[in-house]
């Protein structure tokens, strides 16, 4: 599953292009957002030979510009740390947000570099018109492999829909990170977690 969490994080790119797509966020549904942006982002990857060749600078820039801004990042960090968020100092929270954001950037950059013409299939959307939280369900179709279920959890924010979790084959990205991080925090504390995240990010060139 950890391999999928790294590779299939690429599907988050389907919600990653609002800043440059010209789509009015407030006027479209979460499902429309996912569908419209998927086409644009996938087209960008297919048409950029440098990204396909593994150009790290372009890959990081693509993830930074078009993916991370579409997360409700404050919500994600609070969910990932759980009870540890409330007990953390403002300084510890700020450091965690910075390093966890870099971790996500690394994850999605690696995934973007591994894109190999997978196809996204969308499932029927079931949500009330005034719903504040929705799930957009998809499957990733891989040549020669079994379809992989990927669901996007989105919340309606003031500036449109934002992603706050991705569920891959019934495993939540947020829950996965929370489990890993809580073990480190319980054993060595939040400062230790922040330090280890910073070291890995620096080693990866983020």
Image (cartoon, rainbow, N blue to C red):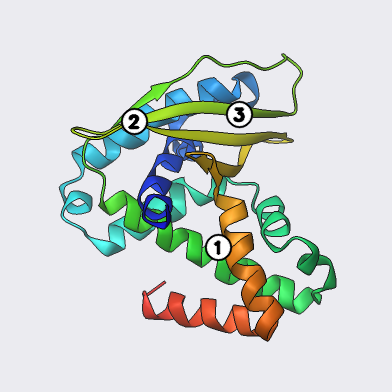
CA distance for labels 3 and 2: 18 Å
Q: Which quadrant holds residue 162?
A: top right
Q: Is residue 199 visible?
A: yes
Q: For the point 57% across and 16% down, which residue is it?
A: 125
Sequence order check, earlier mark of 1 and 2:
1
Residue 40 at x, y percent in the picture: 35, 31
Where does label 2 land, which residue?
147
* Residue nearer the viewer, 47 or 151: 151
Q: Secondary structure at mark 3?
A: strand
According to the picture, the residue beneath numbered tag 3 turns out to be 135
Identify the image quadrant of the C terminus. Answer: bottom left
**Residue at left 24%, top 35%?**
145
Identify the mark at residue 101; answer none if there is no mark.
1
Single out the mark in the foreground, 3 or 2.
Answer: 2
Q: Is residue 191 left or right of residue 205?
A: right
Numbered mark located on residue 37 in the image: none
User: Can residue 161 be seen in this snapshot?
Assistant: no
């Amino acid at each position: 599953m950890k391999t999928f969490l790294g590779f299939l994080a690429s599907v988050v790119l389907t919600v990653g292009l609002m800043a440059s797509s010209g789509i009015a966020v407030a006027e479209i549904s979460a499902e429309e957002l996912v569908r419209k942006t998927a086409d644009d982002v996938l087209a960008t990857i297919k048409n950029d030979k440098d990204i396909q060749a593994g150009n790290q600078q372009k890959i990081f820039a693509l993830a930074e510009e078009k993916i991370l801004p579409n997360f409700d990042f404050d919500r994600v960090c609070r969910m990932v740390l759980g009870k540890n968020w409330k007990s953390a100092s403002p300084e510890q929270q700020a450091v965690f947000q910075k390093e966890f954001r870099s971790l996500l950037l690394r994850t999605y950059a690696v995934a973007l570099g591994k894109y190999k013409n997978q196809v996204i299939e969308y499932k029927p959307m079931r949500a009330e018109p005034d719903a504040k939280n929705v799930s957009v369900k998809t499957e990733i179709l891989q040549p020669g492999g079994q379809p992989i279920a990927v669901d996007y959890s989105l919340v309606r924010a003031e500036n449109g829909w934002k992603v706050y979790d991705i569920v891959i084959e019934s495993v939540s990205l947020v829950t996965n990170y929370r489990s890993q991080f809580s073990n480190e925090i319980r054993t060595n504390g939040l400062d230790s977690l922040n330090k280890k995240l910073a070291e890995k990010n620096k080693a990866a060139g983020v």
